[in-house]
Structure formats: C-alpha cells, structure tokens
Image (tube, rainbow, N blue to C red):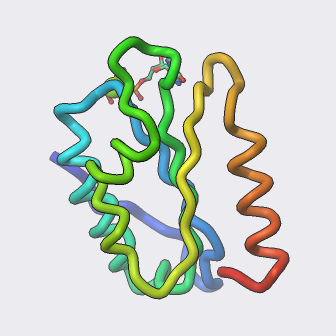
Amino acid sequence: MLEKPQFSVGRPVSAIIYVVDSSDTDRLVTAKDEFHAILEEEELKGAVVLIFANKQDLPGALDDPAVTEALELHRIKNRQWAIFKTSAIKGEGLFEGLDWLSNTLKSGGG
Ligand SMILES: Nc1nc2c(ncn2[C@@H]2O[C@H](COP(=O)(O)OP(=O)(O)OP(=O)(O)O)[C@@H](O)[C@H]2O)c(=O)[nH]1
Ligand SMILES: [Mg+2]
C-alpha cells in the first residue's frame, strides 16, 4: 500500500524530482497513478517536475518516450517538466537533468 507522501510545510516547494525504475514495467502503472496524485498536492502546485527514467543500464528498460507514454506525462498542465534517461549506478544522465532543473529554476520556473 502506498503511503501518502509527507512534505515539509511552511515554504513552497520549487521542484519535484521523480525517479522511476524504467525496467520495472509492471509497476509503472502504479508509478503513474502515484505521480499524478503527487502533482495534485496543494504544496506542490507551482513546482517544476524533473523525471529520471532510471536504470537505463538494465536490459528491457523503457526509453524516455516510452516512459513518457507510460507515465502519461502529456497530462501535465501549466508547469514545466522534463524527462531524462539515467543510470544512477553508472552516473549517467544525472548532471544533464540537474542542469535543466537549475536553469529552469534560475529563469523563474518553480
Ligand atoms: N542497475 C541499476 N540499479 C540501480 C540503479 N539505480 C538504483 N539501482 C539499484 O536499485 C536498487 C533499488 O531499487 P528499487 O527499485 O528502488 O527497489 P527494489 O529493491 O527493486 O524494491 P521495490 O521498492 O520493490 O522496487 C538498489 O539496489 C540500487 O542500487 C540504476 O540506475 N541501475
Ligand atoms: Mg524496484
């Protein structure tokens, strides 16, 4: 059972980094529901969204368009978002994603 995520209260959250296991295709359905529920949280309304399609090193991992489809990212309205392919184990894609986030926040996003 999924627990309701807890957020620090008192100041607005600028960014959400959502890390998904791109190789766990069965559970991407659960991840999709959880993701869209998180976006509905009042505290997170203005936050920009960075998605890491992680575990790209594993065989059968979905690529970024496939994860975009699975998570139904096209449903995201009125906020900036981006998805990056990553392998946390190999250290790939993380800096690119964080660069995007940094630039987006600097230019007034979030
Ligand atoms: N191959 C690979 N493994 C990773 C990567 N990032 C994290 N991991 C490993 O994945 C494991 C955690 O995976 P999770 O999917 O979060 O957890 P899990 O053990 O599968 O359990 P669940 O929560 O049931 O999915 C740890 O052993 C991490 O070291 C990655 O990019 N590639
Ligand atoms: Mg897992």
The image quarter in which residue 75 lies: bottom left
Please tell me whether residue 79 is drawn above or below residue 61 in the rendered image: below
Relative to residue 110, is residue 4 depicted above or below? above
Outermost residue, top side: 59
User: x%, y% of residue 35?
Assistant: 33, 60
Q: Residue at x 30, y 67 (%)?
A: 36
- Compared with 13, 72 (above or below) is above
Residue found at x 77% / y 41%: 95
Is 57 left, or right, of 25 in this rendering?
Answer: right
In the rendered view, would you say 107 is above or below 35? below
Residue pictured at 22% horizontal, 50% vertical: 2
Tell me residue 16's x, y (percent): 55, 63
Asked whether 82 or 17 is in front, the reply is 82
**In screen coordinates, is 109 left or right of 9?**
right
Tell me where residue 102 appears, x and y as whole percent.
Answer: 80, 63
Q: Quadrant of the C terminus?
A: bottom right
Residue closest to the far front: 65
**30 and 58: which is toward the camera:** 58
The residue shown at (24%, 31%) is 25
Q: Quadrant of ligand 2?
A: top left
Q: In the shown orientation, is residue 24 left or right of residue 95? A: left
Total labels: the figure holds: 0
